[in-house]
Image: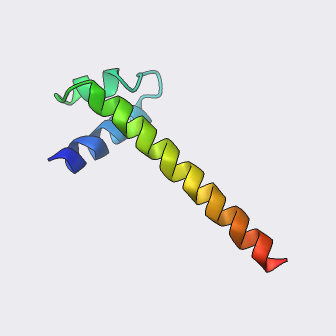
Amino acid sequence: MILRACRSASFTRSEDPTLTWLEAPVLIGVPSDVGESVRRKLRRQGTEMLRRKALELGEAR
């Protein structure tokens, strides 16, 4: 359920970028704090992806 709520909140937010991370989950019927949690998780995953890509490029040289 939690994973589904997180995924739904991120899709809702991506479909309408004018929504805030606190508004998107409310539209799908879950608590607004789920949006902040999703935002932090996506930011963390994005940072990790960039870190790994930088290492990959650094090793290729």
Provide residue 16's location: percent of width, then percent of height: 42, 29
Instruction: Please name whichever residue, 27 or 40, is drawn nearer the observer in this view of the structure.
Output: 40
Provide residue 9's location: percent of width, then percent of height: 30, 36
Residue at the bottom extreme? 60
Q: Is residue 18 above or below residue 59?
A: above
The quarter in which the C terminus is drawn is bottom right
**Image quadrant in which you'd find residue 32:** top left
Q: Residue at x 28, y 33 (%)?
A: 34
Figure disc tally: 0
Q: Is residue 54 above or below residue 28?
A: below
**Image quadrant in which you'd find residue 11:** top left
Instruction: Please name whichever residue, 27 or 47, is drawn nearer the observer in this view of the structure.
Output: 47
Q: Residue at x 70, y 72 (%)?
A: 56
Residue at the right extreme? 61
**Image quadrant in which you'd find residue 5:** top left
Provide residue 23's location: percent of width, then percent of height: 33, 21
User: Which color scheme does this rendered protein use?
Assistant: rainbow
* Image-based side of 57 in relation to 1, left or right: right
Provide residue 20's location: percent of width, then percent of height: 42, 22
